[in-house]
Structure formats: C-alpha cells, structure tokens
Amino acid sequence: MEIAVYLPLLLPLLTVPAARWLAPRCHPRAATWGLLATAVVSAAGSTASLALLTAAGLTRVTPVTAVAALGLVAVLVAVVRTGSRHLRVLRDAYAEAELHPDSDLVVTRDESPIAYALPGAPGRVVVSTGMLAALNATERQVLLAHERAHLADRHHLFLAAVTLAAAANPLVRPLRTAVAYTVERWADETAADRVGDRRSTARAVGKAALATRRTVAGHPAALHATAGPVPRRVSALLDAPPAGRGSRFRAVLLATAALLALVVVSSLDAADDLHDLFETTGITAR
C-alpha cells in the first residue's frame, strides 16, 4: 500500500498535460470525452488515496495519515460546496426555461446582440432581435445550430462534471478551461455539418463575437456561441476537422490511457492492502 496509494496523487502531473496536448489534435467530441474521463479518473483516484490513507490512520496515526485526513475533509467540503452551487444554478436555469413553453427558440426584443443556450427540460435558445439583425440568413442558421448543439449534447453537464473534478483535485483545474473550449468547438463542428459550409460557420462565429464584445447577458448556466478564444475557433473552422493521425498522437494517447488505468489499478491495490492491514491488526468491518 505504501507505494500504490501515492500514485493516484502524483499521476495527474502527467495525465493532465497529456490530455491537454491530445485535445486539439482530435475531433472536439472525442476531445471533450477524453478530457472529462481524465479529470474524473484523476480526481476519483486522488480522493480514494486520501480516503485510504485516512482509513489507515485507524491502525496507527502518523503525520501522513493526519495530513491525508485534513486533505480529505477539504476535498469533501469543496465538492459539496461546488456541487450545491451548480445545482442551484441549474435549478434556476430549468425554472427560467419553463417560462417559455411554446418553442425552443425565444426571441427577445432587444437591440443588444445576445445569443445563448439555456439548459432546461427541454432547454431553450435565447436570441435577441439585435443579434438576428447583425447576421445574414446563413449565419443565423449557424448561430441557432450552434446553440441547439449545446442543448442536444448536454454540454452544460460536461462542464459541471469537470468542475466537480477540479474541486476534488486542484491539479485537474486546467481541464475545466480545456473542456469549456472543446464544447464550443464541438458545437462549431455540429453547426458546420448542419449548414454544410465551414467558411460560413467561421464567419458567423466571428461576426457574432464582434457584435457581442461589449455585451454581457444570460443566465450563469448559459452557453454562448461567442465564448472561449474565438480566433482559435475561427482558425479551426477554416481548416479540416482534426483527425488525430500520426504516430506521436497515438503514442501519447496510449500513454495517457495507460496512466489512467494505472490510477485505477493503484487504487484497487491500495484498497486490498488496507484490507489486509485491517485483518492483521484485528480491525474488521461488522
């Protein structure tokens, strides 16, 4: 247990940079899932390590077990606080979406250019007359397709999950920013496929971002078509979708998968060692 229990605490130093390197080199859908898996496995593994070290303190209290116990309490508090905040935000978003039962598209009479996807059951796309006036017909199609993609693929849940993982393990925090970008790229690619014109999609994203550069509106849970580093998104749309080819890509992908598997195996091995320790010291579960 002495070696295995510490590995999940250290491996995020390797898995997080590797996942961030892989993300822009594959399709945004795959990148989002990969980043989320890395975040969740890394956070779960480190939390399990703290829990196992804390449990080992039942047999003999050491400075390490005491620090682990404090760390575990801090993690649980951070996760509960973050989770509660997100639940409140989503609850309010769902309540706001229910105020517009007639259609998934809500057009507000506002000269300010505003557009966002509001999560709900079902969600709503909110767009202002000012935004519609700033775009031509094809660009409006792109905008609506982008926002509807956010709702259809439940991108707000990806962001919520990686935020919880980051609360549990600070080393995972860079993946929160990465996922915020990849879900926008995912929606961009969906919009481009639906409209059938990557150049028009890039132009629509750029024009919408320029129109809203001084406008801040929408619910805290809303997803905006103009979010993230827009120049990078436009540049990506002007190129072919990344396919993740190349020997270096495959090598990093396999290494990342192996490291994540090692996190899981190490946690299980440490748990087995703890069980043996309890049996040796006479502490058994009743």
Image: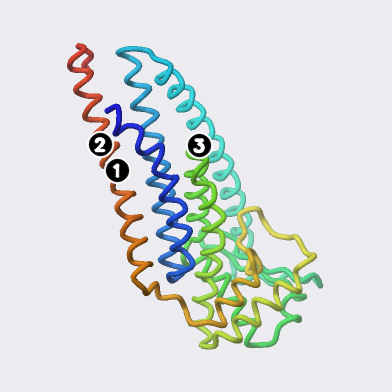
Residue 277: give its label. Answer: none
At mark 3, the secondary structure is helix
Q: Which residue is mark 1?
A: 264
Q: Is residue 135 above or below residue 44?
A: below
Q: Is residue 161 above or below residue 148?
A: above
Is residue 121 toward the left or the right of residue 51 in the image? right
Which is more toward the observer, 261 or 121?
261
Q: Gap in Å between the C-alphas at discs 2 and 1? A: 6 Å
Is the Cβ of the residue at disc 3 closer than 8 Å to that at disc 1? Answer: no
Q: Residue visible at 70% across and 75% down?
A: 208
Residue 79: give its label. Answer: 3
Is the Cβ of the residue at disc 2 closer than 8 Å to that at disc 3? Answer: no
The type of residue carrying mark 2 is Leu
Q: Gap in Å between the C-alphas at discs 2 and 3? A: 22 Å
Please tell me whether mark 2 or mark 3 is closer to you in this view.
2
Please tell me whether mark 3 or mark 1 is closer to you in this view.
1
Q: Residue visible at 54% across and 88% down?
A: 197
Q: Residue visible at 75% across and 60% down?
A: 216
At mark 2, the secondary structure is helix
Q: Which residue is mark 2?
A: 268
At mark 1, the secondary structure is helix
Q: Earlier in the sequence, mark 3 or mark 1?
A: 3
- Residue 33 found in image quarter: bottom left
- Residue 118 found in image quarter: bottom right
Residue 168, image x and y in percent? 48, 38
Is residue 82 toward the left or the right of residue 286 in the image? right
Q: Is residue 286 above or below residue 152?
A: above
Q: Gap in Å between the C-alphas at discs 3 and 1? A: 20 Å
